[in-house]
Amino acid sequence: MRAVVFDLDGTLVDSVAAIADVGNSLMLELGLAALSVEEARGYIGNGAAKFVERALAARAIDADAAALAHHVERFEEIYGAAPGSANPPFAGAELALTTLKAEGVRIGLCTNKPGIPTANLLAALGWSELFEVVIAGDSLATRKPDPAPLVEAARRLGIEVSAPGFAYVGDSEVDAETAERAGSRFALFTRGYRKQPVAALPHTIAFDDLSALPALLADLAAR
Ligand SMILES: O=C(O)COP(=O)(O)O
Ligand SMILES: [Mg+2]
């Protein structure tokens, strides 16, 4: 059998502007200068709490744990109310998903984005039924780069995370580390929110065109 699990932000959807908007609602409430899209891109990858922590640190706000937890809660409230439709899919994303589905490949999602904005986004794009398994940043006790969410996604799809027929598709250092620690094959999308050069991230294959992904993954599964 074959199964593929996808990352979400920076892999299937170009969500940085929408995430920056959510962050900027919080910054405005706190009287802090807005984040540029470029800044926001650098803070994505480790989930909502890290995003807020990095954004506040960039404005020299040294929040204690209680204040930070309060700001994260407010950020998540705004995030959960934001329109999922503000997240454009990357070119070829939907074609890749529907092609894999038509080939009988089972599909899952493993993201550090919180569950509510993830569900809103999938619904807005009409993608909710495509994914048999969705593990978000707050679904389990740990999140990426802990391998547990990816291992669990594979398990729920009925495949070993290290099987030749399984691959994780993501865009970041966090995803590469997650796949490496899980012992999984990793396809790196090079147009996402990575901070380092492609060569610095462990990966099985790298690609820049999602419409080419189904064929690349079929080759990978046959290796
Ligand atoms: O929300 C984040 O920080 C990253 O989300 P992702 O795991 O879908 O890239
Ligand atoms: Mg990502």
Image (cartoon, rainbow, N blue to C red):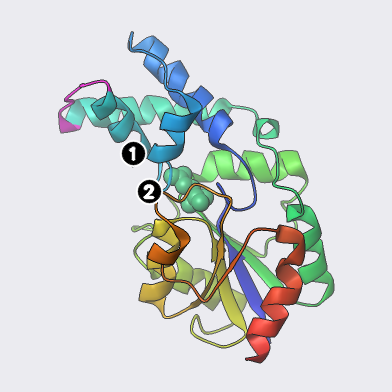
Q: Is mark 2 within 8 Å of ligand 1?
A: yes
Q: Quadrant of the N terminus?
A: bottom right
Q: Left or right? Give the position of 178 relative to 9.
A: left
Q: Position of residue 189 (x, y in %)?
A: 58, 59
In the rendered structure, does residue 180 fall within the stretch colored magenta? no
Please identify the quarter of the rendering in which residue 145 is found: bottom left
- Identify the residue at image location x=64%, y=58%: 208
- Identify the residue at image location x=26%, y=20%: 59
Closer to us: 54 or 42: 42
Please identify the quarter of the rendering in which residue 116 is found: top right
Local secondary structure at mark 1: helix
Which mark, residue 49?
Answer: 1
CA–CA distance in space, label 1 to label 2: 8 Å
Which mark, residue 182?
Answer: none
Local secondary structure at mark 2: loop
Please identify the quarter of the rendering in which residue 16 is found: top right
Name the residue type under label 1: Ala
Is the stretch drawn in magenta largely helix, strand or loop? loop
How many residues crowd mark 1 within 10 Å: few (<14), some (14–19), many (20+)? some
> Which of labels 1 and 2 is toward the front?
2
Q: Is residue 168 above or below residue 51?
A: below
The answer to whether the residues at label 1 and label 2 have Cβ atoms under 8 Å apart is: yes
- Identify the residue at image location x=59%, y=27%: 82
Q: Is residue 160 above or below residue 138?
A: below
Q: Position of residue 210 (x, y in %)?
A: 71, 59
Q: Disc 2 marks which residue?
A: 46
The magenta segment is 59-65
Name the residue type under label 2: Asn
